[in-house]
């Protein structure tokens, strides 16, 4: 039998099949089965009940809030991620490694802790709480708090995607643009940005998925006010706790759908532009 | 345009990249900055371009001090070592870039830009490649796109960083002659960086030999080859035999020979003799030479190369001669021979 790979690293057919099968069974049990269960539960009482659950006023409010939060958090993190990656990879300055470490901080902290930090800062007994209350600014248990917590948790995604990519690309093209008379902004717009566009889209995708799906940090700062400060993940929990399984799974299926779309677009990006993505080279 | 470099210094942390470099480049000159890696040649080029800034000293172009101007204000054509083509733009857009980014008032009409791009594509022998992307080109083609892009803004000064470093030998030789002709036709002032002495000697009007952040010698290729002013230049340019010597009272002792050494201070010294500057003869009592034993003979085409072991010298001496001229016969391995240097250069050993 002709073998393409090195004989020393090639196992027999039975072993190969066995290992692959084990991996698939594991994936099926851990990922596909729950996913299927979500969709099955969501539509168990028929499509009518499914759409009724989704059309519910509180559910729609949760969907709107989730989209609003993502629409604020993702663009802000996009600007921050681009600026941070650009600064870190194209320039030398003191405190650079500290900045890189700080960007990673949200990854290493439990989201619940991130939420608690905001409570400590903005809560009634918190550091800034009394001052904010005196000036009529409401952050905690309101939309601003949810946005802040989401921004914190999703901050590394775009920067993390861009930094390795921009580092690998170096600064020669930027220098060439400058030597041809381009301004800093023209250089960024015509050279730096187009060179990272697919990586940026990839980062935005992951950032958005997390922003919409974030539970821990948001749960701490939201206050769970129905129709007001409930995001979709929080709404799922509330519905579930009220034994309203059909509705809970209906909303959950929307989140699952988001995950599937994200996954599809992500795969498409990796397939077409894999060489322009840092994440695909890990 | 003439370029004046006045006591330029540059330091990267503890590393002294340039130590008070002075150099003047004449209008229309084709100059090579030649040196080993780490000699400061690329640093100097980048400082002239305005991509880096000197810690001290001045750069003047046509008499005007440009030291404080950024690269975009100097109107200099710069060709990067790995070309730095914009990977997401077509060849035509790469070439047009310097014109496209100009403020409206100074930007040529769209049609004029397109015409300039076409003209440059023709000049660079890149006809029909305007719609390609850099990744679809060969190394030599990329190099020419980089040149076209740099020339599109009509600079008077062209700077090239190791322009042929990434090309194979055949393409390199063609491009060298072609670039030299381009320089002459367009009336440019060109400075290029290279570590390849052959390239520098062949193309440049003058060669600037650099070492450890300082200029060792400036001169025509012939000049620096025939009259190297320091041991480094001698070693770096062309093959040379390096012999330990000792100088006392204006006379030098080199491998048993007694030679006049005017102007060389007393003490240890080094003597250089190029392989082709030896006459090879049978040992005789009348004419004293450096005596040794033939270790190897390479008869390679018209050139005869002989390695001679001399007692007391750490390395075998290399001797080259045209066959059938200075040598009576091809010596055999193990034969005793005497070497008579026709030309010997002495430097105090620092």
Image: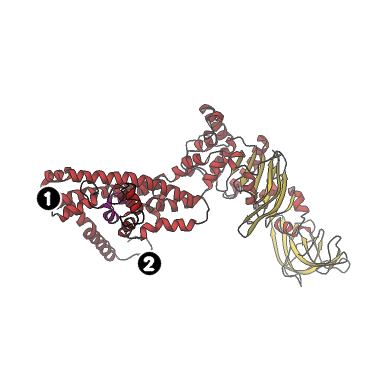
Circle 1 Cα neighbour tier, 10 Å, few/some/many (<14 / 14–19 / ≥20): some
Q: Secondary structure at mark 2?
A: helix
Residue A113, x across and y down, in percent = 32, 60
Mark sitting on residue A44: 1
Highlighted magenta segment, given as a residue range: A209-224
* Front position in the image: A214 or B277: A214
* Front position in the image: B291 or B58: B58
The picture quadrant where one finds residue B279 is bottom right
Mark sitting on residue A8: 2
Left of A129 or right of it: where is B238? right
Residue at the extreme left of the image, as rendered: A45
Q: Is residue A216 in the magenta section?
A: yes
Main SS of residues in magenta = helix
Residue B346, x across and y down, in percent = 80, 61
Circle 2 Cα neighbour tier, 10 Å, few/some/many (<14 / 14–19 / ≥20): few
* Front position in the image: B68 or B51: B68
Q: On the rendered image, what quadrant is the N terminus of chain A found in?
A: bottom left
Q: CA distance from mark 1 to mark 2?
A: 51 Å
Q: On the rendered image, what quadrant is the C terminus of chain A found in?
A: bottom left
Left of A244 or right of it: where is A5? right
Q: Are marks 1 and 2 on the same chain?
A: yes
Contact flag, marks 1 and 2 (Cβ < 8 Å): no
The reply to whether residue A267 is in sight is: no
Q: Secondary structure at mark 1?
A: loop
């Amino acid at each position: 039998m002709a073998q393409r790979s090195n004989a020393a690293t090639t196992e027999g057919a039975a072993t190969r099949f066995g290992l692959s099968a084990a991996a698939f069974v594991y994936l099926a049990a851990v990922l596909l089965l729950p996913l299927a269960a979500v969709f099955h539960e969501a539509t168990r009482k028929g499509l009518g009940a499914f759409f009724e659950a989704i059309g519910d006023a509180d559910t729609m409010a949760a969907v709107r809030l989730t989209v609003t939060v993502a629409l604020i958090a993702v663009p802000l993190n996009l600007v921050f991620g681009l600026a941070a990656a650009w600064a870190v990879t194209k320039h030398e300055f003191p405190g650079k490694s500290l900045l890189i470490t700080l960007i990673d901080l949200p990854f290493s902290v439990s989201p619940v802790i991130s939420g608690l930090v905001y409570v400590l800062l903005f809560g009634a007994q918190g550091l800034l709480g009394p001052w904010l209350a005196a000036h009529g600014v409401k952050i905690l248990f309101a939309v601003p708090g949810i946005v802040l917590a989401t921004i914190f948790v999703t901050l590394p995604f775009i920067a993390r995607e861009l930094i390795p990519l921009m580092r690998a690309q170096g600064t020669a093209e930027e220098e060439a643009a400058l030597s041809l008379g381009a301004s800093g902004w023209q250089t960024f717009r015509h050279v730096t940005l187009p060179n990272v566009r697919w990586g940026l889209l990839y980062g935005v995708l992951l950032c958005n998925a997390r922003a919409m799906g974030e539970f821990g940090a948001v749960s701490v700062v939201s206050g769970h006010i129905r129709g007001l400060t409930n995001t979709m993940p929080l709404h799922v929990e509330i519905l579930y706790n009220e034994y309203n399984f059909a509705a809970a799974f209906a909303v959950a299926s929307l989140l699952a759908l988001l995950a599937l779309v994200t996954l599809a677009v992500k795969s498409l990006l990796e397939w077409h532009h894999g060489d322009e993505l840092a994440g695909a080279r890990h | 345009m003439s370029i004046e470099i006045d006591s330029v210094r540059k330091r990267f942390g503890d590393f002294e990249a340039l130590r008070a470099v002075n150099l003047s480049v004449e209008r229309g000159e084709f100059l090579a900055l030649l040196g080993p890696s780490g000699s400061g040649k690329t640093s100097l080029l980048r400082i002239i371009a305005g991509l880096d800034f000197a810690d001290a000293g001045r750069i003047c172009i046509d008499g005007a001090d440009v030291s404080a101007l950024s690269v975009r204000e100097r109107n200099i054509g710069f060709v990067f070592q790995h070309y730095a083509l914009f990977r997401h733009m077509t060849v035509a857009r790469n070439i047009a870039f310097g014109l496209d980014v100009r403020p409206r008032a100074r930007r040529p009409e769209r049609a004029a830009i397109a015409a300039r791009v076409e003209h440059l594509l023709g000049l660079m022998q890149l006809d029909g490649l305007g719609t390609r992307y850099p990744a679809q080109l060969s190394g030599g083609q990329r190099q020419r796109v980089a040149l076209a892009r740099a020339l599109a803004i009509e600079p008077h000064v062209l700077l090239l960083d190791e322009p042929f470093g990434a090309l194979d030998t055949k393409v390199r030789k063609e491009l060298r002659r072609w670039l030299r002709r381009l320089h002459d036709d367009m009336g440019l002032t060109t400075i290029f960086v290279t570590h390849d002495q052959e390239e520098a000697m062949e193309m440049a009007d003058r060669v600037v030999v650099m070492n450890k952040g300082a200029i060792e010698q400036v001169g025509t290729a012939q000049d620096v080859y025939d009259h190297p002013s320091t041991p480094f230049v001698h070693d770096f340019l062309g093959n040379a035999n390096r012999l330990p010597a000792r100088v006392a009272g204006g006379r030098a002792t080199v491998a048993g020979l007694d030679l006049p050494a005017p102007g060389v201070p007393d003490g240890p010294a080094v003597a250089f003799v190029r392989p082709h500057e030896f006459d090879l003869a049978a040992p005789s009592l009348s004419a004293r030479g450096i005596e040794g034993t033939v270790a190897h003979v390479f008869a390679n085409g018209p050139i005869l190369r002989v390695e001679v072991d001399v007692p007391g010298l750490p390395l075998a001496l290399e001797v080259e001669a045209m066959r059938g001229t200075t040598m009576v016969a091809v010596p055999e391995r193990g034969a005793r021979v005497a070497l008579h240097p026709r030309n010997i250069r002495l430097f105090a050993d620092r």
